[in-house]
Image (spheres, grey):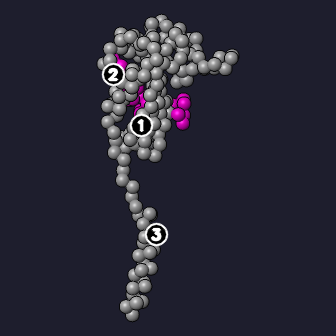
């Protein structure tokens, strides 16, 4: 009898160990300090400059775009752009707000990426020296961010940096599209 009970217990343990992956709950990723990461990103951009960008220069910062949908910027891209704006301003740059097209570059007839003439004229009208562009890609546990500084005169990348943001609950919420607002149902018609 004891051997039979031992055998049943062994079978149950083997079954439970095989099923344990179904009951295993992965520890939730904690949010990182997004402000600190954004400021560090700007520090890296300034350290990596291939040509001077004097303090006091006018820079324009475009909202970061989601690489999965280039026509969309979500809360994550907008708040990181705002933090980059603050960091550049603290570093002594003049940051101006402009509504720039999501797609900053278009291909010319030769197939070379360039800033569209209308956008270039607007940037030159405010005497902007550089535009900061970026994108992000949400992963399972990390949001990957890429930033670039583009010299407006030459239309070339003069600095770049990449970093990861832990995909905690706050970061995850900022990468989701907003829920559609549904209007309340109309009131019932009055009774005759």
Tag nearer the camera, 1 or 2:
1
* Res. 181 visible in picture: no
Q: Position of residue 108 (x, y in %)?
A: 65, 17
Name the residue rendered at 44%, 28% in the picture: 161
Return the residue at label 1: 164
Q: Which residue is mark 3?
A: 18
- Relative vertical location of residue 39 with respect to residue 55 in this rendering, above or below: below
Q: Which residues are magenta?
A: 67-89
The quarter of the image holding the N terminus is bottom left
Residue 9, located in which quarter of the rendered image?
Answer: bottom left
Tell me which label, 1 or 2, sits earlier in the chain. Answer: 2
Depth order, front residue of 47/90: 47
Q: Mark 2 highlights which residue?
A: 86
Residue that appears at 40% across and 42% down? 167
The disc, 3 or 2, on the residue closer to the chain's N-terminal end is 3
Q: Residue 74's spot in the image, x, y percent?
A: 45, 33
Camera-side residue of 142 and 95: 142
Residue 147 visible in rendering: yes
The local crowd at label 3, few if under 14, some if 14 to 19, many if 20 or more residues have their Cα within 10 Å, is few
In this rendering, the label closer to the viewer, 3 or 2 = 3
Residue 83 within the segment the image draws in magenta: yes
Q: Quadrant of residue 58?
A: top left
Q: Position of residue 86 (x, y in %)?
A: 33, 22
Packing grade of label 2 (10 A; few <14, some 14-19, many >=20) is some
**For residue 183, side relative to residue 120 (left or right):** left
| Left or right: 99 as drawn, with respect to 166 | right
Q: CA distance from mark 1 to mark 3?
A: 34 Å
């Amino acid at each position: 009898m004891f051997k039979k009970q031992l055998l049943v217990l062994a079978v149950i343990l083997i079954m439970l160990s095989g099923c344990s992956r179904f009951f295993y709950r992965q520890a939730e990723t904690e949010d990182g300090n997004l402000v600190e990461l954004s400021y560090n990103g700007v520090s890296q951009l300034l350290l990596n400059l291939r040509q001077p960008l004097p303090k006091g220069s006018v820079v324009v910062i475009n909202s970061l775009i989601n690489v999965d949908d280039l026509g969309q910027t979500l809360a994550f891209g907008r708040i990181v752009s705002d933090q980059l704006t603050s960091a550049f301003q603290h570093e002594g740059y003049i940051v101006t707000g402009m509504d720039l097209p999501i797609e900053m570059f278009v291909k010319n007839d030769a197939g070379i990426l360039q800033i569209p003439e209308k956008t270039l004229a607007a940037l030159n009208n405010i005497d902007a020296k550089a535009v900061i562009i970026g994108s992000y890609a949400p992963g399972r546990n990390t949001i990957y961010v890429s930033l670039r500084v583009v010299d407006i005169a030459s239309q070339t990348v003069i600095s770049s940096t990449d970093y990861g943001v832990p995909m905690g609950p706050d970061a995850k919420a900022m990468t989701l599209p907003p829920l559609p607002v549904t209007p309340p149902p109309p009131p019932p018609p009055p009774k005759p």
